[in-house]
Image (spheres, grey):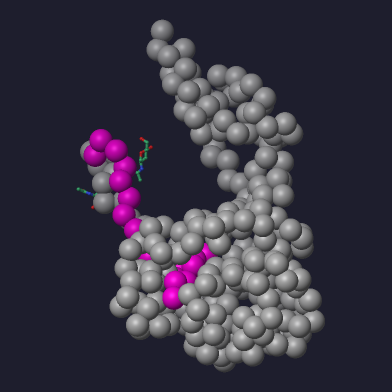
Amino acid sequence: MARPQICLVLFSLYSLFHLPSLTASGAHPAYADQPSCSAVSSDSTPLRREEFDGGRIIDITHFYRPDMPAWESTEGVGQFLWLPKSMTNGSLANNSEMKLGAHTGTHVDAPGHVFQHYFEAGFDVDTLDLAVLNGPALLVDVPRDSNITAKVMKALNIPRGVRRVLFRTLNTDKQLMWKKEFDTSYVGFMRDGAQWLVDNTDIKLVGIDYLSVAAFDDLIPSHLVFLESREIILVEGLKLESVKPGIYSLHCLPLRLRGAEGSPIRCIVID
Ligand SMILES: *[C@@H]1O[C@H](CO)[C@@H](O)[C@H](O)[C@H]1NC(C)=O
Ligand SMILES: *[C@@H]1O[C@H](CO)[C@@H](O)[C@H](O)[C@H]1NC(C)=O
Ligand SMILES: *[C@@H]1O[C@H](CO)[C@@H](O)[C@H](O)[C@H]1NC(C)=O
């Protein structure tokens, strides 16, 4: 008696969360077109995915983990999730708590990050323009032998009108986001590269594949150049390893953390 009811509940939950995969053609092979009750209830292993809908949607966010790199630390992010209320010790439900630096993993910078007057005026992540964070974006490969200087920017030849660019660099080849130890030799923008971008392109969203868009040697100067106008949004720590260069529809949503100059952000690209 109880069994069919459980099946029904599971199926409803399944439908709620997986409706797009059910309706789209060429769904992920792990999903049957019409999930049978047994397929849902017998498979208790969570499906971890970097891509959805047969590769049409790619998650370019790093999942949060204790051994992901943290700024200037050899120890990584460390424990950030606890379970103060647990069903194993009598609670009605599991309730986790987390403590995370606002610039951890895949994250966004707001103007208040490097400008005290912007911070005081309230230019936090809740003021960022969702129209900039969502829209067509170009993924480009940066030559692997240099940081992003004016010369490199010029050579990339990014046409005017392109408003969002994800810069894939040597950081991806070196898998720096998968290494616990912070690496100061990561590739990023030198001041003149940032200035060239501001002066000669229409780019309003700059994405990069390590914890900072600015090279370590030009850390603050490059951030200042990017964030001064409050028109450019910086998305850092992106997972770009399995995305081909080209144009995608980018969707990035930060948390609405009022008062915070940074926030974890979920970013996906849709082909
Ligand atoms: C319940 O268990 C968790 C870990 O499983 C522990 O952190 C927490 O303190 C426990 N809570 C109580 C009320 O015992
Ligand atoms: C949380 O709840 C699930 C489902 O009841 C249970 O299996 C699991 O052991 C709980 N997790 C912890 C860490 O208590
Ligand atoms: C980029 O700059 C960093 C210092 O910020 C340096 O350690 C690194 O070697 C440079 N990378 C390349 C490819 O030139």
Q: Residue at x 76, y 71 (%)?
A: 159
Please name whichever residue, 73 or 143, is drawn nearer the observer in this view of the structure: 143
How far across and down, in percent of the image, does residue 156 sit?
77, 77
Q: How many marks?
A: 0
Q: Residue at x 79, y 81 (%)?
A: 155
Span shown in magenta:
91-111
How far across and down, in percent of the image, does residue 13 sit?
47, 28
How far across and down, in percent of the image, does residue 97 sit?
31, 54
Q: Residue 9: tell me if it is visible.
A: yes
| Residue 57 located left or right of residue 98 | right
| Residue 262 located left or right of residue 142 | left
Q: Residue 67: tell me if it is visible.
A: no
How far across and down, in percent of the image, does residue 96 sit?
33, 50
| 209 lies above or below 15 | below
Q: Residue at x 49, y 67 (%)?
A: 108
| Residue 224 located left or right of residue 26 | left
In what quadrant of the picture does the N terminus appear? top left
| 216 lies above or below 109 | below
| 176 lies above or below 19 | below
| 95 in magenta | yes
Q: Residue at x 40, y 12 (%)?
A: 2
| 93 lies above or below 208 | above
Please name whichever residue, 50 or 87, is drawn nearer the observer in this view of the structure: 50
| Residue 223 located left or right of residue 161 | left
Task: Name the chief secondary structure element in magenta.
Answer: loop
- Quarter holding residue 143: bottom right
